[in-house]
Amino acid sequence: MKLDRRLFRFWRRLPLTSPRLWTRRIAFWAGAVMVALVAIAFADLADEAQALFRLVTTPRPWLVLLIAPAGMALSVLLTRTVFPGAQGSGIPQVMASLHMADPRHVSRVLSLRVAVGKVLLTLLGLASGASVGREGPTVQVGASIMQALGQALRLPRVETQRGLVLAGGAAGVAAAFNTPLAGIVFAIEELSHTFESRTSGMVITAVVIGGIATLALSGNYTYFGVTSVGLPLGTGWMAVILCGVTGGLLGGLFSQILITMARGLRGPAGVWIKRHPIIFAGLCGLVIAVVGLASHGATYGTGYAQARLLVEGNARLPASFFLLKFLATVASYLSGIPGGIFAPSLSVGASLGSWLSTFFTHTPARAIVLLGMVGYFSGVVQAPITAFVIVLEMTANQQMTIPIMTTSMLAFAVSRLVCRRPLYGTLARRFLIETEPAAILRPAPLEDP
């Protein structure tokens, strides 16, 4: 009898037969599916929000002068009063949470309440004409779902709870772009800056399960369509250098502007912005409206439609588009509303590549569009591996692997000349200082030296 009890207890403790571990596994798998479902619904709602904005403003374009400032001001008001922790893209909050020791601080930025606010206020921004994306917010939403799951399971180890957050963020990227490999690389290169066997297993499992759910519901699609264009050797490779340098400079400039403004301007202007954030958001909305009118409505929203047309070779945009989209995205982010920069950055990069292609008459324009896209995106996020993996997976173009990789690495190096610190790491570190200063003293810094 004693032997039977010992065997029973031994059987219950085995990893493959433990009921407790299987309960956690099933809950974890259900959480990964939930992240994918929310990401799909978020994408559909984002399209509807942009369609609503076009429906209202197309007959009367001047209405944007009222809608954009009012929408930005309302979004910031709700962010500060009802959904604190939902501001910005959400990626810095996820990165900061991985270094927090106090669960209460983590819950302030990763909770179901914050996730709901993130979705609703991002949709409000898109319905108001803001140049924001949903991909960064999806990272915070995915991490929040997994954080809530960890609390429900009452996991004893802090490392396991952080692994869930990391897995949720990775699944969010994978589901948002339908790029499983990019989700894994993003989690390792950008979110955690480390590779651990326990954590990597959770990340890969979440991405695979979320990917299966996305495939079942949305089909096997590519984010920007399929392009089979290649880049011939010789003069065509001059485009790699030009796109890498130009994209790195502009991307670094974009990041430096955001970092400088996050630190706060000196003098009366900086004091006024801190005292009147809602009015400042309204002024940013006015800038977005004016830029949108100057571009005949092209700079509103994510920029996904314009980027896809350029990648597929079905459109040519004026040279001013990437500059106006750049300004609209800066104003949108500085306003403090919830919203990401992934899709707008890819749109700016694609239009930059389209403009640069005019200098290479014997090189396929679509190839240079891809180079401009990865060059600018890598310059902004300063995560070169993530950048070229995302672009490769989003376009399903293996012929451009080496040119895209080269452009991404070159843009990263050039961007560091303009902006010495990575955007997300710097914003996360600042957020962490404000929330939990003691975390900065612990190892695993958020910024590269």
Image (tube, helix red, strand yellow):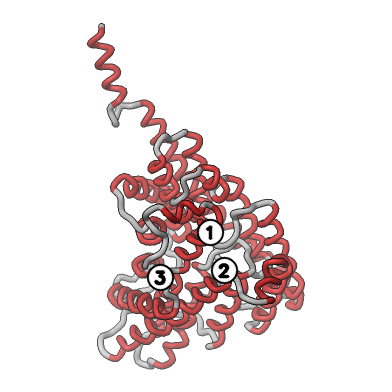
Disc 1 and disc 2: Cα gap in Å? 10 Å
- Residue carrying label 3: 382
Within 10 angstroms of label 1, few (less than 14), some, or many (20 or more) residues? some
Badge 1 marks a residue whose secondary structure is: helix
Left or right of 145, for residue 192: left
Q: Tell me the crowding category of disc 2: few under 14, some 14 to 19, or many 20 or more residues within 10 angstroms, Cα based.
A: some
Give the number of the mark in front: 2 or 3. 2
Disc nearer the start of the sequence (1/2): 2
Look at 36% across and 70% down and name the residue there: 384
In-image side of 290 versus 221 (left or right): right
Front residue of 411/104: it is 104
Circle 2 residue? 262
* Left or right, residue 303 beside residue 405: right
- Which residue is denoted by mark 1 in the rendering? 431
Q: Which mark is residue 169?
A: none
Residue 131 falls in which quadrant of the image? bottom right
